[in-house]
Image (spheres, rainbow, N blue to C red):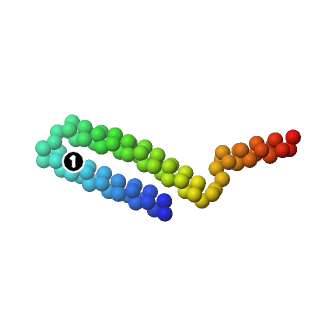
Amino acid sequence: MVKKLLYLGLGGALLAKEKIEEEIEKLSEKGRLSKEEVKKIIDEAYKKGEEEEKRAKAELKKLLKEVIKESGLATKKDIQELKEEIAKLAR
């Protein structure tokens, strides 16, 4: 399910990106936007995309941690603590 949501989000973002680029190019061809304005718009969109990617990754990480916690799966930290306990008992 998480994988499908991720693909849906990425697919939507790519479609939006393509549409925006088409519209910006049309405005540029009609002379309504200069090449500098087009570059500025694309750069700003790219920066916002990077920020959104960071936010999405943080949200996904948070969600995965919650899923692991709720499902009762052992984390690396849990396993390391058990190894340390076993090592103490074996002495």
Q: Is residue 54 left or right of residue 77?
A: left
Q: Classify residue 65 as left or right of residue 54.
A: right
- Using a 10 Å C-alpha cutoff, classify the residue at mark 1 as few (fewer than 14 neighbours), some (14 to 19) or many (20 or more): many
Tell which of 55 and 82 is nearer to you.
Answer: 82
User: Hey, which residue is sitting farthest left in the picture?
Assistant: 31
Q: Where is residue 53 drawn, in percent x and y?
A: 41, 46
Amino acid on which disc 1 is placed:
Ile
| SS for callout 1 | helix
Q: Quadrant of residue 41?
A: top left
Q: Nearer the viewer, residue 80 or 42?
A: 80
Q: Nearer the viewer, residue 34 or 63?
A: 63
Picture layout, residue 64 above or below residue 87: below
Residue 84 relative to residue 16: left or right: right
Considering depth in this image, is 26 or 15 the residue closer to the camera? 15
Where the C terminus falls, by quadrant? Answer: top right
Q: Is residue 62 left or right of residue 11?
A: right
Residue 23 position in % (x across, y down): 21, 51
Q: Which residue lies under the disc numbered 1? A: 24
- Position of residue 54 measured from the top left corner of the image (x, y, whole percent): 43, 43
Q: Position of residue 59 (x, y in %)?
A: 45, 49
User: From this viewpoint, which residue is outermost toward the top?
Assistant: 36
Numbered marks: total:
1
- Residue at 21% across, 48% down: 24
- Seen at 20% across and 38% down, the residue is 37
